[in-house]
Amino acid sequence: MRNILNVVLVLGSVASVNAFPKFSNARPRSIEIRAPQAPPAEGGAPPAVAPAPGAPPATPGAAPPGLAPAPGAPAPVPVPAPGAPAPAPGAPGAPAPGGLTDVDILQFALTLENLESNFYQQGFAKFPDTEFAALGLAPEQITALKAVGGTEATHVTQLMSAITAAGTQPVQPCQYNFGFTTPANMVATARVLEAVGISAYLGAAPLVQSKAVLTAAAQIVTIEARHQTFIRTASKAVPVPNAFDTPLGPRAVFTLAAPFIASCPQGSNLNIQAFPAIALAGGGMGITAGQSLVLADPAQPQGAQFCAFVNQGMSMFAPLAQGSCQVPANMSGEVYMMVTRTQSIADADILAGPSVIIMT
């Protein structure tokens, strides 16, 4: 029986803001995508999967990354995905590739922490403890969930102090639209937000010039990881689904954050442009290996050749054939899915996404 999954690809341009640093907030139009195809019949060819750029050549006799190894063969070692370019040499504070200084990166981190802090504040103001208890959360788990929100607020304060000490005015909180209607939806969104936060810090790390800034970021990312592990546990999901987390570059991260941002105050806009977004019906939940994702219009986005699936620090690529690509096997937890022009997730090759897929 075929399961039908609707996907929406959001395309559009980003308006510039006459302020520095600039953050771009897009509200693009939508193009529908569907995914009605069942997995291929037994004996059919698996999706083409390629290692991330820079990965070493495959060992003879070993399975390609993302596929199960042959019996008795060692499992492939994940190769870091190019979530962000390597830093350029130069004095601390000098712009890294892409023109982002250390202060810009701190401002970007503050933007994300403001979003997370406001997310928890709005959620706890909207839903009483009794509704979280109805989900099966014990009183101590509800207290711990509130503590997660408290630490996000502390991260905001710490980052504001660091930015002020650098002689720059910190960006202000934006207006947000989180769209949660139930506590269950809030907890599910929190799980994804924390995963994206981890990926954001990992992806920004190679761009940081100052060791002091890098240390400050490391002190935060470890807490973000604890947040996500707790939320996964409270949600009765596997606490640690993978041996590796996945870095994402600033544009990919902002693409995931932008739908929650309604507007930002003048002067609180970064020079980061979101990619066209991919929205999966059902929030990307319940997707399985072998399922096909199908573009409603095979001609859009123009030049699309691959679906990229980023998980456990590796990039796996499934060719788009007549607008359809197959979800690879051996992925778990949160997976970032993109549409690309080549077997690369470099900014120049991403046409849309990422979107977050929760594998089952």
Image (spheres, grey):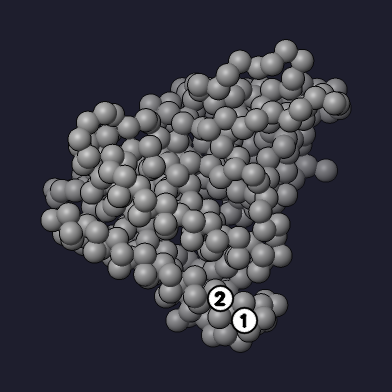
Using residue 341 as the reference point, say whether residue 171 is left or right of it. left
Residue 180, percent from left and from top: 51, 68
Check disc 1 and report the residue beneath it: 140
Residue 299, percent from left and from top: 50, 26
The image quarter containing residue 67 is: top right
The image quarter containing residue 348 is: top left
Using residue 195 as the reference point, say whether residue 322 is left or right of it. right
Label 2, label 1: how far apart the Cα atoms are: 6 Å
Which amino acid, by three-letter code, is at mark 1? Glu
Which amino acid, by three-letter code, is at mark 2? Ala
Residue 138, percent from left and from top: 67, 81
Residue 124 drawn above or below residue 153:
below
Q: Quick one: SS at disc 1?
A: helix
Using residue 54 as the reference point, say whether residue 272 is left or right of it. left
Instruction: State the residue in front, 41 or 30.
Output: 41
CB under 8 Å between discs 2 and 1: yes
Residue 346, percent from left and from top: 43, 28
Residue 87 is at least partly visible in this image? yes
Instruction: State the residue in front, 217 or 309.
Output: 217
- Which of the labelled discs sits on residue 144, or is there none? 2
Using residue 254 as the reference point, say whether residue 101 is left or right of it. left
